[in-house]
Amino acid sequence: MTSRSPEQCFASYRSIILDFADFCEKLRHPLPVHLRINTLKALVTETCLRLTRLGIQWILEDPIDIVLRVRNGVRPGHLREYSLGHLHSQAFSSVLAGLILDPKPASLVLDLCAAPGSKTTLLAQLMRNNGVIVANEKNPTRLIPLRTNLKRLGVTNTISVCYPGQHFPKLLAFDRVLVDVPCSGEGTLRTGPDGTLRWSGQSGSRLPSLQRELLLRAFDLLAPNGILVYSTCTYNPDENESVVQCLLDNRPASIEPISLDIPHAPGLERWQEITYDPSIRLCWRIYPHQLDTVGFFLARVGRAN
Amino acid sequence: MWLLSQHSRLPALASLRVESVGLPLLRQVNTYLKPTTAALQVFGNYATRNVVNLASSQLTELVANGILTSDFAFSSGYVIVETEGIIIGCALYLPGRLISQFPRHLFTAQTWEDLSK
Ligand SMILES: C[S@@+](CC[C@H](N)C(=O)[O-])C[C@H]1O[C@@H](n2cnc3c(N)ncnc32)[C@H](O)[C@@H]1O
């Protein structure tokens, strides 16, 4: 565990993050609380009214009409609406991963790294409980919170399985694949009361090689006209652009544009000595000083013709 | 008994080592089938009978004591508990009393502290 200022912690990213001082300043403020309204069980207007009646101030995160930002101090897990599954606590950027995957009601979807199920349950919501989602999680103990969330949020279209994602059986092709890999989690960091970031991050570990294996297998499971989303909650290019570059080098993949109107920075052109494929600029980097939420990386991938 | 959405490619998924499927719908209790609270919260809105509408104070009592002493115009059996248009879950009605069948996780004191608001 290290305790350092944002400037020290992220010094190596000074050259890639525009307005680096603003970025560091934002990390000195707590993460906002975002709640997703689960339209499988609740209506947006009624839920907003109930929160207002409870004295909770909220704003809808434009243009996404299912995500509320609530005033700090609200403990989502203590709300009755939460235990009834009308609400789910989920970062705005995490919701974007599901929206970008854009599953259709009839889709067959694979969520390769699914626990605790925030994105799986969002995908089920977007599919209105139709189609089928296969939610895979390698760690058996993490299947428990996954199942609890599926039940609480009223998801009926999901099968849970437990494979190391990189060895997921190649039995069938999926219309949509989400690869929300384990990562160093840099994007979740905000300073504590002492002004430092407490980080037990795993950068420099074997994460990038696992991430590459997961992304390659995910691509192998994608149907011909399918869409895959690769996401992390880290700024580290070794876990982001470099992993996507490995996919482009080894498979007939293409990076697709993301058509949402949300503040973001483009994927990097280069990092240290590596120059990336120009299409990687179509990926999104979500920085907290541009969008106040968990920092994220998102790549929308299709099969090259 | 579990409920899963229909899909043409479901048979192909049968070869996976499956851990769980869909949403638990009914559980066998002795010789009866009890609907799960999870399923009722999703599908209870479609019910046209055996729905008991409780005032907030009655729901608070049911949650706090696990039982609510009151007469309702039902025959004995499982009923759907609703309050303010929200489906809460399953209860067992026996003449003169309603017995909560809600899962434990719905009961934490903090979760329900604002019930009366
Ligand atoms: C970033 S989290 C996923 C969060 C989840 N998608 C959500 O939105 O709630 C990554 C997950 O991948 C799991 N994991 C780690 N190694 C894995 C592997 N080899 N195959 C599949 N899952 C793995 C971790 O246990 C963790 O639950």
Image: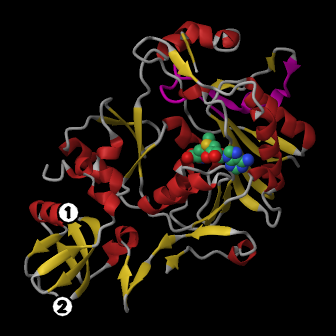
State the image coordinates of residue A110 (x, y, percent, origin top left).
68, 57
User: Can you tell which quarter of the image residue B37 is in?
Assistant: bottom left
Left or right, A194 with respect to A94, comes to left
Residue in the foreground of this view, choosing between A260 and B84? B84
Report how many numbered discs are placed on residues in the image.
2
Residue that numbered label 2 is attached to:
B75
The residue at 49%/13% (across/down) is A196
Position of residue A73 relative to residue A224, above or below, is above
Q: Magenta stretch: give its range.
A: A274-297
Position of residue B8 relative to residue A137, above or below, is below
**Quadrant into which the N terminus of chain A falls:** top right
Q: Do dots 1 and 2 share one subunit? A: yes
Position of residue A265 relative to residue B34, above or below, is above
Label 1 environment density (alpha carbons within 10 Å; few <14, some 14–19, many ≥20): many
From where the camera sits, is residue A179 visible? no
User: Can you tell which quarter of the image residue B6 is in?
Assistant: bottom right
Membership of A280 in magenta stretch: yes
Membership of B39 in magenta stretch: no
Earlier in the chain: of badge 1 and badge 2, it is 1
The residue at 18%/91% (across/down) is B75
Ligand 1 under 8 Å from disc 2 Cβ: no
From where the camera sits, is residue A108 visible? yes
Residue in the foreground of this view, choosing between A282 and B48? B48
User: Can you tell which quarter of the image residue A204 is in?
Assistant: top right
Residue in the foreground of this view, choosing between A106 and B57? B57
The alpha-carbon separation of the residues under discs 1 and 2 comes to 22 Å
Q: Secondary structure at mark 2?
A: loop
Left or right, A141 with respect to A27, comes to right
- Residue type, numbered disc 1: Val
- Residue type, numbered disc 2: Ser
